[in-house]
């Protein structure tokens, strides 16, 4: 049986897009299946009964869930063009920062959502302020860690691509959160994604993504 | 400065399960290390220097370079000291081990903490969530002796501490966390795992931990009332 790779994802999900970046960087052919997360397929529920979420990678019939776990699996299965550093210490640092980014995102996104969905000016401002507080932590760490150590985008950078969703939310709201002056390192990062050959293919179409969130979170 | 030359230093806290699971990893790998106790809640300048991002233990220092986040540290230990492997070789089984460790940390542990620190309806709900999530975790055993198979591995040391802390927490908080009827296989595994000499000898003194747990609970309850 030929090796078979399937990705169950959602076009608007940064976690699903990350996996696409990883697979494309490795040159792995895969079948993409779009899931309607408001009406999940029995197949998805069968492959990820624990969390019932995308992304799920299925390789030769075996399912793997959780985006960072999937990325490590991809890196270990297809060994060329490594995503993670080879050196154990550098690898550990990459894991540390990827976890940090995900944890921060889950603090930033609810704040952004609050700002996007609130009817009131005060709640909106509070949401933005809260988001910027967490972005500040991220920015500080980025500046100090010299995120762009190498030429290629790796595990940490792929994980950080979810920052684009913050930029999208700005356009949805018509308000600035991730300004170049306040967050120069983060801003530079988003530019890198938009211009990188592989990322470009994986970033969702801008206008449809903005429209999607506008419709979803209209207060 | 901690860690001389090639040395290994672990900054920890006696009552921390996260420091404990790193100790277990080091023990299994037979790594000689220097242990430095942090007198929490006071944090030493060394800790703040070595983990400026989170300012938390455990921190492993190897050849002068610090690492934080216990599961990140354990994977590092597994990669540097290759004998007695913790993670399996096969990528799919590695992915499963990582998946379940994440599940336990994100779904079981916070529920346990809420069941311990809340009262009334909130506590009851949290305890139910914990019991259900432990039931889900049990499925990962797949009829094996240990999560690692015939011998303990990454997932065993990642989650085994829950058996010890949950028993103490349920006694102090007065709510059922380990339901042996609901999780017969996991209950047996908890017991077997915690009885292993290599595991048992690293556990904090149980009477001291019980006192510590009672004190902590008292503090949380007072905060609830104010």
Image (cartoon, coloured by chain):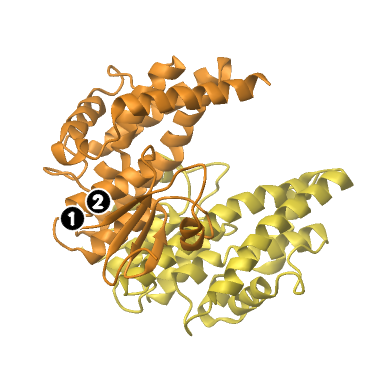
Chain colours: A yellow, B orange
Residue A59 at what x, y percent from top left? 30, 59
Give neighbour class at mark 2: few <14, some 14-19, many 20+ (Cα, 10 Å): many
Q: Quadrant of residue B7?
A: bottom left
* Up-down relation of residue A30 to residue B215 (above or below): below
Q: Quadrant of residue A180?
A: bottom right
| Image quarter hosting the C terminus of chain B | top right
Identify the residue under disc 2.
B25
Q: Are marks 2 and 1 in contact (CB under 8 Å)?
A: yes
* Up-down relation of residue B199 to residue A15 (above or below): above
Q: Nearer the viewer, residue A81 or B66?
A: B66
Residue B194 at what x, y percent from top left? 21, 33
Residue A153 at what x, y percent from top left? 48, 77
Q: Is circle 2 on the same chain as circle 1?
A: yes
Element marked by disc 1: loop
The residue at 61%/63% (across/down) is A138
The residue at 40%/66% (across/down) is B1
Q: Is residue B219 left or right of residue B174?
A: right
Q: Disc 2 to disc 1, how far (Cα)?
A: 6 Å
Say which chain tag 2 marks: B
Callout count: 2
Q: Nearer the viewer, residue B212 or B128?
A: B212
Tell me if residue B147 can be seen: yes
Say which chain tag 1 marks: B
Q: Is residue A3 left or right of residue A22?
A: left
Identify the residue under disc 1.
B29
Q: Is residue A127 left or right of residue B36?
A: right
Q: Nearer the viewer, residue B221 or B116?
A: B221
Q: Is residue A172 left or right of residue A196?
A: right
Q: Nearer the viewer, residue B37 or B62?
A: B37
* Up-down relation of residue A135 to residue A85 (above or below): above
Element marked by disc 2: helix
């Amino acid at each position: 049986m030929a090796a078979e790779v399937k990705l169950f994802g959602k076009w608007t999900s940064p976690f699903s897009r990350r996996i696409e970046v990883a697979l494309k960087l490795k040159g792995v052919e895969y079948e993409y299946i779009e899931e309607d997360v408001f009406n999940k397929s029995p197949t998805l529920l069968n492959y990820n009964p624990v969390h019932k979420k995308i992304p799920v990678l299925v390789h030769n019939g075996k399912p793997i869930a959780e985006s960072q776990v999937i990325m490590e699996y991809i890196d270990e299965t297809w060994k060329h063009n490594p995503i993670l550093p080879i050196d154990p210490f550098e690898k550990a640092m990459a894991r540390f920062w990827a976890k940090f980014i995900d944890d921060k995102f889950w603090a930033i996104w609810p704040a952004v959502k609050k700002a996007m969905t609130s009817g009131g000016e005060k709640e909106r401002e509070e949401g933005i302020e809260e988001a910027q507080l967490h972005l500040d932590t991220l920015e500080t760490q980025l500046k100090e860690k010299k995120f762009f150590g190498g030429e290629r985008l790796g595990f940490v950078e792929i994980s950080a691509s979810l920052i684009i969703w913050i930029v999208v939310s700005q356009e949805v709201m018509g308000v600035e959160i991730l300004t170049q002056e306040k967050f120069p390192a983060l801003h530079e990062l988003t530019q890198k994604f938009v211009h990188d050959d592989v990322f470009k293919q994986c970033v969702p179409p801008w206008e449809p993504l903005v429209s999607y969130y506008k419709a979803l979170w209209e207060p | 400065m901690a860690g001389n030359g090639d040395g290994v230093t672990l900054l920890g806290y006696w009552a921390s399960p996260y420091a404990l699971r790193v100790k277990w990893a080091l023990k299994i790998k037979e790594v000689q290390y220097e242990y430095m106790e942090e007198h929490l809640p006071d944090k030493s300048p060394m800790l703040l220097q070595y983990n400026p991002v989170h300012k938390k233990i455990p921190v492993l220092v190897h050849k002068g370079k610090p690492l934080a986040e216990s599961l990140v540290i354990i994977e590092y230990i597994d990669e540097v000291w290759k004998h007695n492997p913790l993670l399996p070789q096969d990528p799919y089984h590695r992915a499963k081990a990582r998946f379940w460790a994440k599940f336990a940390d994100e779904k079981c542990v916070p529920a346990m903490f809420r069941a311990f620190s809340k009262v009334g309806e909130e506590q009851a709900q949290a305890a139910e969530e914990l019991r259900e999530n432990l039931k889900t975790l049990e499925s990962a055993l797949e009829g094996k002796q240990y999560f690692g198979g015939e011998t303990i591995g990454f997932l065993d040391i990642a989650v085994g501490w829950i058996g010890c802390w949950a028993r103490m927490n349920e006694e102090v908080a007065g709510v059922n966390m380990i339901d042996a009827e609901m999780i017969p296989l996991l209950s047996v595994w908890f017991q077997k795992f915690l009885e292993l000499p290599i595991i048992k000898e690293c556990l904090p003194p149980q009477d001291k931990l019980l006192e510590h747990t009672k004190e902590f609970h008292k503090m949380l309850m007072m905060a609830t009332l104010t």
